[in-house]
């Protein structure tokens, strides 16, 4: 994640909509962060596999929870301000929304139930620090940080408005999604496809 765009300026979703489509930014508390160039194949494989498993598990006409994969704009208002005044807009790698009222043609307004960020060296610090704080404040119920190189997932769950101590698991077997009863992500086949970590 590169330096903030116009670090002295405060931006809103109205500004964001006017920026060129070929360059992607996220807004956090009014600061615009240039997103990394096209993700690596490894990153896309991990995000795509998690999305595929969630989509399969959540399929069916009676299911209200819907999974999405980036790029999808997620507007995180602080209160009930109109969209043009929202100053935080993020694009999680994978997300699940269980409240249909949060979905509209522009994307998602309000906290997803599950957010998954797949880490890369360029984004790890940003995702761990800034975005974790934003997701906690917004009320994301479960937040996963998947570390493909380290073969680990760090999981934060919301309790009484705060993320508790993270649970850290190896990418082995299955990891249940607490906010989606009966849903788990299976890792073994995916990990076999990932390149071996470099020494």
Image (tube, rainbow, N blue to C red):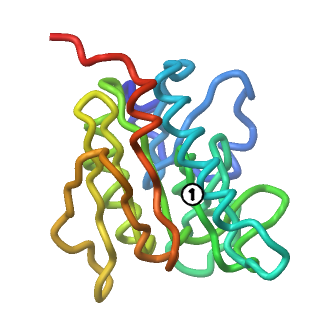
Crowd class of label 1 (few under 14; some 14 to 19; many from 20; radius 10 Å): many
User: Toward the viewer: 192 or 93?
Assistant: 192
Residue occupying the point 75% across, 68% down: 103
Write the residue at 70% across / 71% down: 82
Horizontal relation, residue 47 to residue 159: left or right:
right
Residue 107 placement (x, y as % from top left): 73, 57
Residue, disc 1 = 95
Nearest the viewer among 94 and 72 is 94
Q: Quadrant of the N terminus?
A: top left
Q: Residue furthest top?
A: 199
Image quarter of residue 168: bottom left
Q: Secondary structure at mark 1?
A: strand
Q: Please give left or right for residue 158 compared with residue 50 in the image.
A: left
Residue 184: horizontal and vertical position, in percent?
Answer: 47, 63
Q: Residue at x 68, y 58 (%)?
A: 56
Note whether 132 is above or below 114 in the view shown.
above
Would you place residue 102 above or below residue 161 in this image? above
Residue 169 position, x and y percent, is 23, 54
Q: Residue at x 60, y 58 (%)?
A: 54
Residue 21 image position (x, y, % from top left): 74, 28
Residue at the limit of the structure toward the bottom, as seen here: 160
Q: What is the count of numbered marks?
A: 1
Q: Where, quadrant-wise, is the C terminus in this rendering?
A: top left
Residue 104 to residue 116: above or below: below
Query: As rendered, which of 191 and 38 lies closer to the eye?
Result: 191
């Amino acid at each position: 994640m590169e330096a903030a765009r116009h670090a002295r300026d405060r931006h809103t979703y109205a500004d964001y909509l006017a920026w060129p489509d070929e360059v992607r930014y996220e807004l956090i508390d009014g600061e615009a962060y240039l997103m990394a160039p096209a993700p690596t194949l490894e990153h896309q494989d991990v995000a795509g596999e998690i999305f595929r498993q969630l989509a399969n598990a959540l399929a069916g006409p009676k299911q209200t929870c819907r999974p999405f994969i980036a790029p999808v704009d997620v507007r995180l208002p602080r209160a009930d301000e109109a969209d043009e005044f929202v100053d935080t807009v993020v694009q999680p790698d994978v997300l699940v929304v269980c409240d249909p009222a949060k979905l509209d043609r522009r994307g998602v307004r309000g906290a997803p139930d599950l957010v998954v960020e797949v880490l890369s060296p360029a984004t790890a610090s940003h995702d761990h620090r800034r975005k974790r704080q934003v997701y906690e404040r917004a009320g994301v119920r479960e937040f996963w940080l998947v570390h493909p190189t380290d073969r680990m997932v760090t999981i934060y769950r919301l309790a009484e408005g705060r993320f508790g101590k993270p649970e850290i698991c190896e990418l082995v077997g299955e990891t249940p999604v607490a906010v989606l009863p009966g849903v788990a992500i299976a890792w073994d086949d995916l990990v076999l496809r990932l390149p071996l970590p470099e020494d």
